[in-house]
Amino acid sequence: MEYSSNDNDNLPFLKFESMLKTNHVLFFDSEEFENIIHHYLNHGKMSLAKKAIKLGLDQHPGSTNLKLFKVEVFVFENKLVQADTLLNELYLLEPMNEEIFIQKANILSKKDEHLQAIDVLKQALELTDDVLDIYSLIGMEYLFLDQFEDAKSYFIKCLNEDVEDYSALYNIIYCFDFLNQNDEAIEYLNSFLDLNPYCEVAWHQLGKQYFTLKDYKKALAAFDFAIISDDTFVGAYLEKGKVLEKLKRFEEAIEFYSFTLKLEDPTSFALLRIGSCYEKLKKDDLAVQYYYKTVHEDPLLDKGWIAITRFYNKKRNYQKALYYINKAINIDSENVIYWKLYSQINLRLKLYEEAERGFKKTLDLGNYELATWLSRGDLLIKLGETEGAIFNFEQAVVFYPENAELEYRLAGLFFTLNKTDKGTFHLKNALKYNAEYSFIIDELFPEICNKIQVKNLLKTKP
């Protein structure tokens, strides 16, 4: 067999997997086993990792590190009692081994005992010079507890240890954002950039903070510095495009979104934003072209289908709008926004049964907006389905009690069915809740306006 230049690194894995195939047991030192196990765990090959742990402990039964890998697998498989038992045994042998404390904290975290996990991790800090990972773990435990100030302080410690720990930087900004501390985030990022002026991630995050505060001039400057620091940083181009859109500088926005298409494979977000910019520039042919590219690139992106449907809706080309929303529904029939658009388009096409079906589906999917109940009920009235309309509005009253618009409709429907007592009950409620909406009776139920009971009630409105 010929080996490549990387095979020296791969030899232990090749040797180990060859041994598994032949059942011929070979010897590995404990460090080789550790590397093999670590490799398999990192690549999610749990069964191979477990085989390596077993064989490793057969050959090196006293190895604490191999036993700690066994603990890690126990925790992964949620066998917390076995993990805890083995850790206690290891602690008796090596009470100053920080990895034992880290794994103990991991078990406590799995049990949602986060404060205890933090206490154990703080003990581990006293036993090691390599504090970075432990700071990060403590920060994560505080996040689980929603204690964002404490979490932030530990992630800041991580970044103080390693200025290129960008996951810590992202977590710091996440904490600032959750606490609505945009000004404080800006102050922190500026002080960090004073020491690390070419950190593109920090400039990018600074720009996003300014964007949130609608300080678009400073946001642009920050994204420019991010691009200067790394001219292949796609996120900075995208964010600068968003700022330029806000400033209505659509041609420039297109330019920056287009940069991203050259730097990496096209993203549906960039294609969609380019389409939107062209639409605002009234370059409809180009807008539609990019909307087509968006849905082709990512058929599951609802914003793409919504954009192309609304484009044709605005142009009053309802047949094309309906065609595209139907395609979207065929891909994702559980999307509420699709069904709402479907209903609105069918209404404009006077396809009332289809529109009612869309509103019903919207409600079935858990979208209980008042407008949806009213639209569906009014369509059922138009279609002559009186009982169905009553049932619809009675369901709506559960979610919107004391709502005049619903009560007027129920009153009109019951009077239409000559159920005077129920009609009177609902009309009195309606007038009590909002007498100004009594025009609903005239508009939807003109045939009952001459009924004596209705006339008398309407005369007595406050």
Image (cartoon, helix red, strand yellow):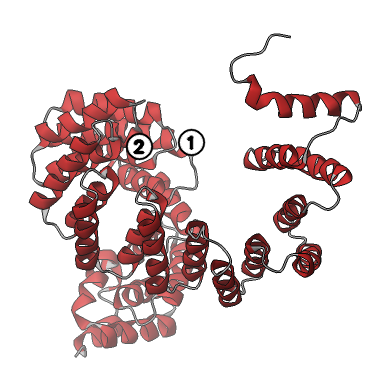
Q: Position of residue 25 (x, y in %)?
A: 90, 30
Q: Amino acid at mark 2?
A: Trp
Please name whichever residue, 321 or 285, is drawn nearer the observer in this view of the structure. Answer: 285
Q: Is residue 193 left or right of residue 138?
A: left
Residue 84's place in the image compared with 454, above or below, is: above
Q: Which mark sits nearer the N-terminus, 2 or 1? A: 2
Q: Residue under circle 2?
A: 305
Residue at position x 11%, y 36% in the image: 250
Q: Are marks 2 and 1 in contact (CB under 8 Å)?
A: yes
Please name whichever residue, 369 or 149, is drawn nearer the observer in this view of the structure. Answer: 149
Q: Secondary structure at mark 2?
A: helix
Q: Amino acid at mark 1?
A: Ile
The local crowd at label 1, few if under 14, some if 14 to 19, many if 20 or more residues have their Cα within 10 Å, is few
Q: Is residue 419 left or right of residue 181?
A: right
Q: Is residue 396 left or right of residue 187?
A: right
Quadrant location of the C terminus? bottom left
Q: Residue under circle 1?
A: 331
Residue 344's place in the image compared with 48, above or below, is: below
Residue 394's place in the image compared with 3, above or below, is: below
The local crowd at label 2, few if under 14, some if 14 to 19, many if 20 or more residues have their Cα within 10 Å, is many
Residue at position x 35%, y 55% in the image: 169
Q: Position of residue 96 (x, y in %)?
A: 67, 67
Q: Secondary structure at mark 1?
A: helix
